[in-house]
Image (tube, rainbow, N blue to C red):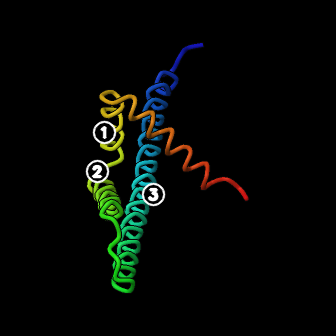
């Protein structure tokens, strides 16, 4: 049986189709990650504003100044929200890899802490 030119074409077509599917999946994934990142940034910003307003209200009502440490923590929450807003997911992944290479002990400690906190909040009653 003689091979026709159409039989020699499918591998190229398959390769192009696979590449198109891969690009589509990557694009969809990046969009979903971007949306979740945006929601996280909005959540952090809202949390920071809510807690800051509560602190100011408490201080005004009780006429007691809360420790500056609490206010610095809120500044860090704001910084985290701004960082998430400014960076793409790929840039954040690159930053995390760089930090892990430079400071492996702190990176592992942070991952462990985040895991413990996540487990605490995700734990079913």
First in sequence, mark 3 or 2: give its number.
3
Read off the residue under disc 2: 87
Query: Looking at the image, do the residues carrying marks 1 and 2 touch, with CB atoms under 8 Å apart?
Result: yes
Q: Secondary structure at mark 1?
A: helix
In this rendered view, identify the residue nearer to me: 47 or 10.
Answer: 47
Left/right of residue 116 with respect to residue 62 in the rendered view: right
Give the vertical position of 3 relative to 76 (above or below). Answer: above
Left/right of residue 114 with respect to residue 90 in the rendered view: right
* Extreme-right residue of the structure: 125
Read off the residue under disc 1: 95
Q: Secondary structure at mark 3?
A: helix
First in sequence, mark 3 or 1: give its number.
3
Give the vertical position of 72 relative to 89 (above or below). Answer: below
Q: Residue at x 51, y 38 (%)?
A: 112
Q: Residue at x 31, y 57 (%)?
A: 76
The percent coordinates of residue 55 (x first, y second) are 37, 75
Q: Is residue 65 at least partly visible in the picture? A: yes
Read off the residue under disc 3: 36
In the picture, the quarter occupied by the C terminus is bottom right
How dense is the environment of label 2, judged by Cα within 10 Å: few (below 14), some, or many (20 and up)?
some
Compute the Cα span from label 3 to label 2: 13 Å
The percent coordinates of residue 37 (x first, y second) are 40, 56
First in sequence, mark 1 or 2: give its number.
2
Residue 111 circle label: none
Residue 70 quadrant: bottom left
Compute the Cα span from label 3 to label 1: 18 Å
Compute the Cα span from label 1 to label 2: 10 Å
In this rendered view, identify the residue nearer to me: 18 or 25.
Answer: 25
Q: Secondary structure at mark 2?
A: loop
In this rendered view, identify the residue nearer to me: 15 or 35.
Answer: 35
């Amino acid at each position: 049986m003689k091979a026709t030119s159409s039989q020699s074409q499918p591998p190229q077509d398959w390769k192009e189709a696979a590449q198109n599917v891969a690009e589509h999946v990557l694009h969809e994934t990046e969009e979903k990650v971007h949306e979740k990142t945006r929601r996280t940034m909005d959540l952090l910003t809202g949390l920071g504003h809510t807690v800051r307003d509560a602190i100011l209200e408490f201080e005004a009502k009780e006429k007691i100044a809360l420790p500056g440490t609490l206010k610095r923590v809120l500044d860090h929450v704001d910084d985290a929200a701004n960082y998430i807003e400014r960076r793409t997911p790929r840039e954040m992944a690159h930053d995390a890899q760089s930090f892990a290479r430079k400071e492996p002990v702190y990176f592992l400690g942070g991952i462990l802490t985040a895991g413990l906190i996540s487990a605490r909040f995700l734990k079913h009653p």
